[in-house]
Amino acid sequence: MTIIQQDLATLQSTTNTIDSDSIEKKSIEENVSQTVNNSADTDLIEEELSEEDSVDITHLRTPIKVDLSPVYNFLGARTTQAWVNAAIENLPMIIQDHANCEKKAAGTAMNLIFRYEFSYDLQRKLAQLIREEMLHYEQVLGIMNERGQEWKYLSAGRYAKGMLKHKRTYEPAAMVDVLIIGAFIEARSCERFAALAEVIDDERLAKYYRYLLKSESRHFEDYLALAQSLSDENIDERVAFFKEVEAELISSPDAELRFHSGTPA
Ligand SMILES: [Fe+2]
Ligand SMILES: [Fe+2]
């Protein structure tokens, strides 16, 4: 805790004890704000209150441009215009499924954190990822609430199952496969947010999708790096295998529209 933060905490606790005296409280609050504003630590405090972490999406800092070329190169196929059109026509359902995806991303990472406790890197990266996915979940819940959209049950699509059925059953291969699949799910999410952001008729939502690009593209890279660092052998062949499986799931006809579904049948 910096000296300024200690001052702030002391002043705030003083403020709490004199709740009945509003004039004195106001003057203390002014002191607090002056102390903060005059401090050389101002940048540090602003950094700690960064709006990157805000549940309210109004003031999120949206990067002007995120380089998505690593995402596009990693994926074996681009989303079809037919999927984008269907998604726009069924936006509430896509938002609902997006909420499910954020929750599942956190849940999958939580499973990994319990199953593979030996790796410091894995634990640290997954802990950060879970925190970020749960923030996204809260943000999407807020968007649904704002839009007056009620929670609706949605069955899972074929996408994740379609990849997980190829997961090897022995360790560490099983763990490596789950991490590679995680990388594909994150990369695809990123690609679809970018595609939707370009065409949706809701600037607030488009801005939110652009905000997500930075974290989701980092999640893809984190999963991939973890998979390689925890594997005894080079993972290129396995990545190439899942690249084909994933591209097929995205490009082939799919009767069910979901955030990660194939081309509308
Ligand atoms: Fe997310
Ligand atoms: Fe993510």
Image: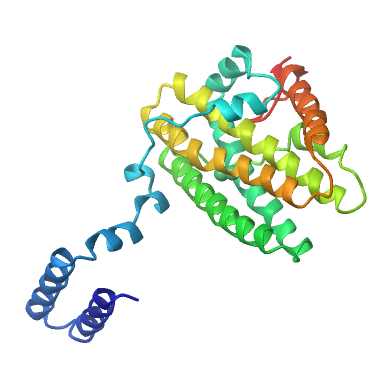
View extreme (right): residue: 170
- Relative placement, left or right, of 241 versus 34 is right
Q: Quadrant of residue 97?
A: top right
Color encoding of the figure: rainbow
Quadrant (top left/top right/bottom left/bottom right) for the N terminus = bottom left
Q: How many marks?
A: 0
- Relative placement, left or right, of 130 versus 6 is right
**Residue that appears at 74% across and 66% down:** 117
Q: State the image coordinates of residue 246 (x, y, percent, origin top left).
A: 75, 28
Q: In the displayed structure, would residue 104 be above or below residue 119?
A: above
Q: Quadrant of ligand 1?
A: top right
Q: In the displayed structure, would residue 42 be above or below residue 21?
A: above
Q: Quadrant of residue 239?
A: top right
Q: In the displayed structure, would residue 94 be above or below residue 102?
A: above
Quadrant (top left/top right/bottom left/bottom right) for the C terminus = top right
Q: State the image coordinates of residue 255 (x, y, percent, origin top left).
A: 75, 20
217 or 262, nearer to the observer: 217
- Relative placement, left or right, of 198 versus 238 is left
**Residue that appears at 38% across and 49% down:** 56
Q: State the image coordinates of residue 42 (x, y, percent, origin top left).
A: 22, 62
**Residue that appears at 79% across and 31% down:** 242
- Relative placement, left or right, of 115 versus 220 is right
148 or 62, nearer to the observer: 62
Q: State the image coordinates of residue 166 (x, y, percent, origin top left).
A: 88, 37
